[in-house]
Amino acid sequence: MPQYQSSSVENARNAVAARLRETRLDAVLKGHELAARCGWHKSKVSRIENARTPPTDADIREWCTACDANDQAADIIAASRTAASTYMEWKRLQRTGLRRLQESRIPLYERTKLHRGYASHVVPGLFQTPTYAAAPLSTIRHFHRAPDDITEAVDARMARARVLHETGHRFTLLVEESVLRYQVGDAEAMAGQSGHLLSVMSLPAVSLGVIPFSARERGMWTLEGFNIFDDQRVHVELLTARPVCRRAHHRDVPHPPSAVSADRLVACTPACA
């Protein structure tokens, strides 16, 4: 199984390194001068600034003290902890299968009043039929070599969709035309899914829009899908990892440029979400 690198996490680490370099430059210090003040080997400053060595909390505090920038230490430490500790491979999360992952989302969907989202490749999970849902979940299971609990995972996904019929919820989702055309499952599964979408679109709480191929400018392509839960949380759909990015209370912590930011939390989730 090939190893996949997370550009989001790499960018987050680079942002921390750049922030530390800026504090050194603002203090008009050369790398060897900063190392001397901190009692480090001179190569350590270069390794940190080039994101080859992640700094510890103590390193950041010493760095900021040496640069007379103690007011920046807390924010940089927060960013460093986010980059270092919140990246988790979905292979680890899915060792017990996909059912538990699907069930874990139900409380979030139940408490969300306004659900907004964008899908570029597959029908949003809330709008899927059991037959359609089994196809992408099976693909994810094989990709991660997870235990085979597809039937239970599909049941959990269908249980989550009950919120479509409950009062107090609104759903506004946008999909690419390709979502309706990609072959997911066999012809019978696609026909059943199309009919189900027409039924879902008739629900008073649901608004579903389609971006036609003709709306795309030449040279553009679709990107990752995402879901917004009220104004509290954003899930960005990735395949291999779950980096979680939190925003600092007083100053903005550097975020990965590719992440979608929310007021509280951004969680990158697998495409089977």
Image (cartoon, rainbow, N blue to C red):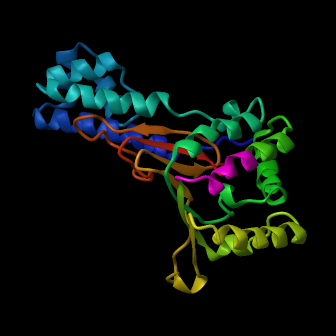
Q: Position of residue 260 (x, y in %)?
A: 43, 52
Residue at image coords 52%, 78%: 219
Q: Tell me: residue 273, above or below residue 23.
A: below
Residue at image coords 11%, 25%: 68
Answer whether residue 52 is visible to the viewer in this image.
no
Residue at image coords 78%, 34%: 97
Side (left or right) of 269 relative to 245? right
Closer to the camera, 110 or 185? 110
Q: How many marks?
A: 0
Question: Looking at this rendering, what residue extends furthest in the top direction?
Answer: 39
The verdict on residue 162 being magenta is yes
Question: Looking at this rendering, what residue extends furthest in the bottom direction?
Answer: 214
Closer to the camera, 49 or 166? 166
Placement of the N terminus among the 4 image quadrants = top right
Residue 30 sits in which quadrant?
top left
Q: Position of residue 45 (x, y in %)?
A: 29, 27
Q: Tell me: residue 216, above or below residue 66.
A: below
Closer to the camera, 200 or 174? 200
Side (left or right) of 199 relative to 219? right
Q: Which residues are magenta?
A: 157-168
